Image: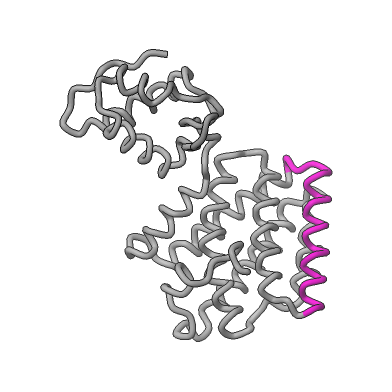
Amino acid sequence: MQFRPIHTRRAFEEICERIREQLALGVLKPGDKLPPERDLAQQLGVSRNVLREALRTLEMAGVLRLQKGVKGGAFVQEGDTSRMNDVMRDMLSLGTISVRELSEARIQVIDLVVRLACANARQADFEALEANIERTELATSEGRLLDRVECSREFYKLLAMATRNKVIAMIVDSVTEIHMRFVYAKVASSGAATPRLADKRRQFLSALRSRDVLAAARLMRIHLESVQRMLEQDPGSMSLHVALAEIQPGMRR
């Protein structure tokens, strides 16, 4: 592969653009390794310091993975969907979007997910969801409510995967990740939890297995709206800061 020399004041931005062009053209693919730093800097006509700034920028964007050592270098990543989560969280923190908008979007998106999952889900998806429900029931019986929230995160991830649509799965993962932070914070602060969650999940799964779109969509909407009502009760007990920063689902020890 060959890269054209850089002629711009902000050279590192141009380097990032050139590498992204190679990705768009299919010259670079996930898993590929970029040329050695010295060679790449020479091809681009820039200093190694400028090149390193560009590589670090692409690493932060989730495009590259920088590995040290004899077999190290800059490798093209598969793609990191968590970047979308970060953007969504930042927009919420900055007030660009509201919690209500997030909740409304989630209900509408999950409705679409249910309809697609009814059409595209496979036996392996049903089995994965059933196993998740069993873990949810066990966590509930043992009083591990925060672990039950983790099961809910996984449930929606599995449901989104059953759509066989990667774009929708990414959107669901982003919206659910942020929403679950609020659920997690609410449960942690007040112990509030949806009653008979495992039973409701099984009713939904039964409708999903039967490919009953109307029943599955209705059951899911009823559940999502009940969760939203729970979150809106005593909103002062849970700040946006706590939900987005201090309580992080999937990272509790």
The residue that appears at 20% across and 34% down in the rendered structure is 10
- Seen from the viewer's position, the closer of residues 10 and 180 is 10
Image quadrant holding the C terminus, namely: bottom right
- Seen from the viewer's position, the closer of residues 230 and 6 is 6
Residue 41 left/right relative to 140: left
Magenta residues: mostly which secondary structure?
A: helix
In the image, residue 69 lies at what x, y percent?
A: 51, 35
The residue that appears at 38% across and 59% down in the rendered structure is 90
Residue found at the very far front of the displayed protein? 70
In the image, residue 80 lies at what x, y percent?
A: 52, 43
Image quadrant holding the N terminus, namely: top left
Q: Magenta span covers which residues? A: 119-142
In the image, residue 79 lies at what x, y percent?
A: 52, 38
The residue that appears at 47% across and 30% down in the rendered structure is 73
Q: Is residue 179 above or below residue 85?
A: below
The answer to whether residue 134 is magenta is yes
- Residue 139: image quadrant is bottom right
Residue 41 left/right relative to 88: left
